[in-house]
Image (cartoon, coloured by chain):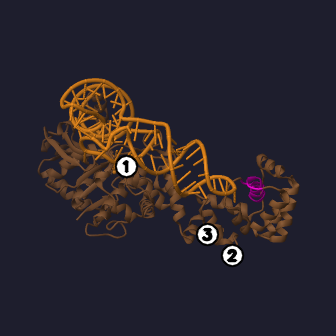
RNA sequence: GCUCCCUUCGUCUAGUGGCCUAGGACAUCGCCCUCUCACGGCGGUAACGCGGAUUCGAAUUCCGCAGGGAGCGCCA
């Protein structure tokens, strides 16, 4: 049974990199009919904010990622909030202390910072020097009596090779001597990420951990903890990072860097899903795929080892595809139901159909709503040139034809062709500009139908008056 | 500084020693279709970071270099 998880900390909106870790974890579980777990890592009370645990779940659900265990659904390994798992961690701290594989550390922030500075200036790796490593029971007792509250450090074994096969990067080998004793419980009693993340994965029987590449060097630490406790270890796969268009790590200054931003910007779930799935994972299929299809064709072995750039062009491509796939109802939800009230009921279907072929975002639909249903056309100089080029006679002829044929555009055009000896672009462009003040857009036939005879006449008249 | 990761068209990638005069998609350019944009069709431009080694043969293996990134936190 495959079990994967996503374990965000509620300190902010879900970053695209993390969202992708969640996505791939969910896809992998889905592909293998396994279980995908959501676990909230809120051990850092000072930085965790409740609002984010809700937002993060909303955003995940929006992306179409659903968890079989976690907040809201529970499961056999409850609770799924780390802040509520203190007793569980306490047992393992005790075990480690009993085995003397963990020891209290009384060093202050100041001492540690100073030490790091000295080591760095000497060209050494900034590692914990082991100050409290050999404190006797008496010394420890004395300090505690003095009112000092220690943190707990893991005693890293000496001269030990930690080896594992990374699911995407391949065989890895680390020397324990490159790793300093690290904190597993803070002085305030809370658990550090390094510790509870590993413990929870093991306790929850997670089989495959897919996470960001930035955790690769953490893996030997977590493996050492689990090994010391004789607990089962998951397999790890480290996903390459997503960078901005300039190759630098994705950040706020690149614009949309969180799922939430994308959602707010009007991107569709399927667009984001297809784009993100294909960032550092190759699919043979070129068409837009559903979550299920993406899962079915997901292969760990197809995950790329190299970092991938976030590319707006490509996202836009999937957005275009996704918009075209929308049903009429979905289109209304997407463009905003308020538009309905402005548009007469008999014209709604046609409006949606027309917008669907030309819009990338809801705002585009609003532009066409304004053009077609609010009478405030403004021609710019170039457009005025086009109108004047056609001339007053053109538009008076147009009005005459419309009066006779109504919105039967073909009849109108035929008559104008014969009367004015114009055709092609010379015929269509002045009409398009007169009716929409745009040089591009949906088919004129549809535009004329939506406008109706009276409005078409008004607009031709206005065009004539500026010639 | 130390440890680790990464490096194929502008971008995402295919590629696991001969099928590679390196394939696809997006972007871009041109043509066709066409009332415009889009769609669609056809075609073009465009890449194996550098240097060695192994081999009859290397994008693919090995070594070095360069560049980019991560970790070395009482952050996660």
Taken as a whole, is the magenta stretch helix, strand or loop?
helix
**In the drawing, what numbered circle is on residue A337?**
3
Residue A201's tag is none
What's the residue at 69%, 63% (across, down)?
Answer: A369
Which numbered dot is residue A280?
1
Disc 1/disc 2 C-alpha distance (Å) = 46 Å
Chain at numbered mark 2: A
In the image, is A1 to the left or to the right of A354? left
Q: Distance between the residues labelled 1 and 3?
A: 37 Å
Whether the magenta-drawn stretch holds residue A343 is answered as: no
**Along the polypeptide, which appears first: circle 2 or circle 3?**
3
Write down the chain letter for disc 3.
A
Disc 1 crowd, CA 10 A, few/some/many (<14, 14-19, 20+): many
Colour that chain A carries in the picture? brown
Q: Look at chain B in the picture and name its colour.
A: orange
Q: Mark 2 points at which residue?
A: A346
> Relative to A53, is A253 above or below?
above
Name the front one of labels 1 and 3. Answer: 1
Q: Where is residue A218 in the image (x, y as percent from the top left)?
A: 26, 45
**Is residue A382 visible to the viewer in this orientation of the structure?**
yes
Q: Mark 1 lies on which chain?
A: A
């Amino acid at each position: 049974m495959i079990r994967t998880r996503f374990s965000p900390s509620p300190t902010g909106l879900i970053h695209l990199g993390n969202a992708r870790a969640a996505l791939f974890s969910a896809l992998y579980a889905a592909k293998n009919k396994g279980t995908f777990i959501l676990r909230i890592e809120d051990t850092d009370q000072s930085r965790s904010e409740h609002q984010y645990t809700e937002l993060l779940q909303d955003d995940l659900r929006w992306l179409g990622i659903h968890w079989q265990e976690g907040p809201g659904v529970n499961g056999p390994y409850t609770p799924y909030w780390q802040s509520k798992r203190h007793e569980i961690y306490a047992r393992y701290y005790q075990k480690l202390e009993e085995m003397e594989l963990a020891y209290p550390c009384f060093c202050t922030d100041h001492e540690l910072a100073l030490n790091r500075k000295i080591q760095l200036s000497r060209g050494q790796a900034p590692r914990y020097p082991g100050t409290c490593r050999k404190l006797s029971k008496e010394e420890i007792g004395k300090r505690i009596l003095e009112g000092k509250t220690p943190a707990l450090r893991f005693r890293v074994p000496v001269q030990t090779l930690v080896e594992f096969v990374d699911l995407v990067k391949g065989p890895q080998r680390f020397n324990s001597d490159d790793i300093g004793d690290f904190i597993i419980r803070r002085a305030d009693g809370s658990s550090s990420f390094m510790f509870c993340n590993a413990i929870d994965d093991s306790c929850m029987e997670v089989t495959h951990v897919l996470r960001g590449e930035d955790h690769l060097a953490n893996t030997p630490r977590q493996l050492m903890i689990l090994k010391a406790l004789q607990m089962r270890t998951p397999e790890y796969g480290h996903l390459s990072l997503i960078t901005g268009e300039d190759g630098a790590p994705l950040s706020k200054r690149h614009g949309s860097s969180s799922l939430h931003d994308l959602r707010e910007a009007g991107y569709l779930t399927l667009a984001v899903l297809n784009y993100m799935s294909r960032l550092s994972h190759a699919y043979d299929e070129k068409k837009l795929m559903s979550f299920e299809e993406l899962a079915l064709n997901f292969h760990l072995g197809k995950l790329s080892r190299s970092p991938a750039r976030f590319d707006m062009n490509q996202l836009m491509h999937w957005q275009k595809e996704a918009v075209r796939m929308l049903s009429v109802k979905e289109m209304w939800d997407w463009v905003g139901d308020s538009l309905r009230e402005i548009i007469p009921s008999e014209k709604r279907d046609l409006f949606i159909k027309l917008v669907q072929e030309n819009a990338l975002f809801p705002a585009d639909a609003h532009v066409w709503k304004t053009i077609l249903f609010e009478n405030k056309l403004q021609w710019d100089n170039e457009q005025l040139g086009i109108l004047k080029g056609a001339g007053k006679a053109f538009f008076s002829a147009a009005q005459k034809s419309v009066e006779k044929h109504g919105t039967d555009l073909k009849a109108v055009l035929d008559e104008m062709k014969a009367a004015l000896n114009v055709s092609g672009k010379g015929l269509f462009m002045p009409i398009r500009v007169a009716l929409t003040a745009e040089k591009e857009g949906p088919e004129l036939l549809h535009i004329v139908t939506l406008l109706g005879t009276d409005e078409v006449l008004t607009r031709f008249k206005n065009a004539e008056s500026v010639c």
